[in-house]
Each structure stands twice: as C-alpha cells, then as structure tokens.
Amino acid sequence: MTTKKFMMVNRKAPYGTIYAWEALEVVLIAAAFEQDVSLAFLDDGVYQLKKGQQTKGIEIKGFEKTWGALEDYDVTQLYVARESLEERGLSAEDLTVPVEVLSRADIGKLMEEQDVLLSF
Amino acid sequence: MLHIINKSPYDRCAVDSALATGAGVILLIEDGVYAAVKGGAEEKKIKGALGRFKFYALIADLEARGLGDRVIDGITPVDYAGFVDLVAENKTCQSWL
Amino acid sequence: MAFELNGKTYETDEEGYLINLGDWDEDVARFLAQQEAVALTENHWEVINFLRDYYNEFQIAPAVRVLTKAIGKKLGADKGNSQYLYELFPYGPAKQACKIAGLPKPTGCV
C-alpha cells in the first residue's frame, strides 16, 4: 500500500460540534491503514486536549482517554499552536498527552510538507 | 432579558453581540462556557462587563471540557435546574446561535 | 434488533453488537460466542478480557494491527500474531472478539 503523509487540522472545540470526534475517528482509520498520520491543533482545537474532561453531565461519550491510544496506532506527531494555547490561558502542562508546541508559522511549514490535509 | 450563548468567544462574536445590547443576564452553555474561563485573552472583556451583566455558566458543560475549576470570579456556575429557573425568571430570552 | 437471554432483553445494532456496554456479562459472552459458532476456551477469554480492559482504558476497540501488537506486548509473541488470533476468532479477531466482548465494532473495520 502506498503511504501518504496525512495531517488532520483540528480547529474546533470538543463536544459543541461533532468535528473533533470525527477527526479522531479518521485518525484511527488512517493509522489502521498504516498511513503517516500527524495532527495539528489550532485555534479552539487546542481545547480537545485539555486534561480533566468529565462528560457524564452532558451525557456524551468523552474522548480524552482515547488520545492515549494514539501511540499504539503509531501516531506520535501531535503539534499544538503556541499562540492558540496562550490566547486561551493554557500551556502544555494542561494537556492530556505529550505534544510538540510550535508557532503557527512552523505548523504552516509542516502543512506544506503533507500529501493530504484534512480539515476539521 | 436572558442571553444564551453557546459559541466559543475565540471562534465567534456571539459574546460581543450580547454585550452590545447593554445590560441583562447572560447564560453560557456548550462551547459558550469558554468565555467563563480564567487566564484567556477574553477574560478582561468579561470582567469589564460583570457590572452590567449577571453571568452564569452551565456546570455540566464546564466539567465536560475540563474547566470546572477555572471559572472567573463573579460568574455563577448553574446546573440544568438553574438553567430552567433563569428562563422562567426572565421575560424574554435571546439565543445567540 | 435484540435477543433474549435468561428472561432479559438485550438490544443490539443490525450487525449484532451490543448497544449498552453495561449489559455485558460472561453469560452474554457465551451466548454471543454461540451465535458466532465459537467455542470459548481459556485462550478466548484471555483475548476477550484484554479487549475489555483496553476499552476501559482508551474508550475504543482497537484495530486488528493494534490489537495484535498490544497482545504481543502483554501476553507474549506466540499470542501477539494474527495467525493465533484468527485461529481463535476465524472471522477476524477485532470484529468477532469485540462482538463477544460486548464492545462496539472497531473503528476502521469494514
């Protein structure tokens, strides 16, 4: 199978819309087909990785724990925009998995290197 | 008037639209609860409006987003029953969808 | 869809996967295995319990490749290979074992 470089560009907060969950499902599918998958978290997308999500009260399945499975899928390239974190009063310590914090410009360079960009 | 906001202030201008009406009660739900959180760039604007508006934020939505412990002082967390009370107490209700 | 067992009704989707994860117990697993014509042995239970633990930890049913690798890590290389897992669950370890374990169909499984 041909391997392509896929990047999911996540810009939406979790739970308010279905986008964040859909992105995660696509990541798992692409990774199951052994593609080179990376994720970029920009704008409200950084909220997806916030620690301590307790979704019982809104009766929606939470997916904070699922980020921990990405390593099993060999998905280890998680990039988070520094500007987006700072604007929201967050830092890498607030996030549930290890990530690489980069400037938006550096994430832009990584986007240029991809074969496929998927926007969520 | 009760203003209900369900959009993130970092993504949409719904909070600004509500604040521009002058004064009243604002209930933050769903992604709107991000406006209730300390430490972000929007905090100053919200704090500046606390005198004109009474702010509430839905607890279940804060907790779902891992933010139950970061609410700006002066914003009251409410549960679903509190949501119903706010709707009942106010003559009209505007949802900034 | 649904099936009845010991006087209780269990809801499933159109492919026979349990709707409510909390409904699952070992009797349900035995019933579902019977539907799949799988005779459960110790080795089957090992995989079923592994899958349930994986789901509790990560909230997803793993894809076959991931399952194989993770089982190899935990139970040894003689079990962490697709031949062994397909012998236990001929219609696909992820698909069939997940159904018997009361989990949803794995993401990416068609």
Image (tube, coloured by chain):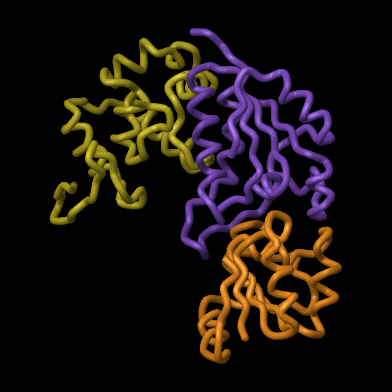
Q: Is residue C93 left or right of residue C53?
A: left
Q: Against B91, is A6 above or below?
A: above
Q: How many marks?
A: 0
Name the residue at 71% across, 25% down: A111
Q: Position of residue A38 (x, y in %)?
A: 65, 26
Q: Position of residue C57 (x, y in %)?
A: 53, 41
- Specify the colour of chain B: orange
Q: Against C57, is B54 above or below?
A: below
Q: Position of residue B51 (x, y in %)?
A: 81, 84
Q: Quadrant of the C terminus of chain A?
A: top right
Can residue A75 be seen here? no
Give the yellow chain's letter.
C
Q: Position of residue B59 (x, y in %)?
A: 61, 70
Tell me where residue B39 sits by quadrant: bottom right
Name the residue at 85% across, 76% down: B48
Can residue A8 be seen here? yes
Give the purple chain's letter.
A
Q: Against B86, is B63 above or below?
A: above
Q: Against B68, is A116 above or below?
A: above
Tell me where residue B72 sits by quadrant: bottom right
Say which of B54 and C39 sits in front: B54
Q: Is residue C37 left or right of residue C63?
A: left
